[in-house]
Amino acid sequence: MRHAIVLGLLFIMLEASATDSVVLRGEVSWTANGIARISECGTGRVLEFGTMASSPYFRFKRRYEELSVDPKTPVLVEVEGVIARARSATNELTIQHPKVISVTKGGCDKVPPNSANVKWRQVLPC
């Protein structure tokens, strides 16, 4: 029995280390259910945000609403998380454990070069 528990824990640790965290930058949109989506700059792939704690979610949503004065104003987000495929037939991508790094006004066409090192980033508190 102990060996089975040890093996199970080993597999869990291996799976956790195999899922590398990535940082994505893209334009934000929202589903009718209030789920954030990011259209990644450069690739155009669309990922839905996975579950977020309520405080970071509401800070992110409030910051988005401050920047998008009207629905046509694009807003960029930089988010860290783990990319996973949804288990549904639609085969959508999801970013699990999303941590919003920055939110700023602008679209993918206006991302400055080497933007990871410039001051346009506005870090949201956790």
Image (cartoon, helix red, strand yellow):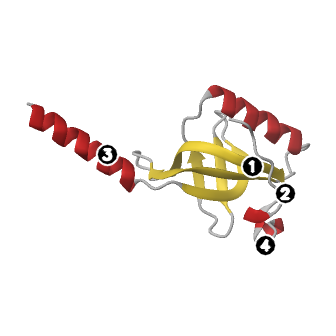
Residue 82 appears at what percent x and percent y? 50, 51
Tell me the tag on residue 113: 4
How much space separates mark 4 and mark 3, taking CA atoms? 37 Å
Secondary structure of the residue carrying tag 3 is helix
Q: Nearer the viewer, mark 4 or mark 3?
A: 3
What kind of residue is marked 4?
Pro
Tell me the tag on residue 120: 2
Label 1: few (<14), some (14–19) or many (≥20) C-alpha neighbours in 10 Å: some
- Taking the image as shown, residue 70 lies to the left or right of residue 86, namely right
- Residue at 80% in and 68% down: 109
Name the residue tied to disc 1: 102
The quadrant where residue 120 appears: bottom right
How much space separates mark 3 and mark 1, taking CA atoms? 30 Å
Name the residue tied to disc 3: 13
The quadrant where residue 31 appears: top right
Q: Which of marks 3 and 1 is in front?
A: 3
- Residue at 69% in and 65% down: 41
How much space separates mark 1 and mark 2, taking CA atoms? 9 Å
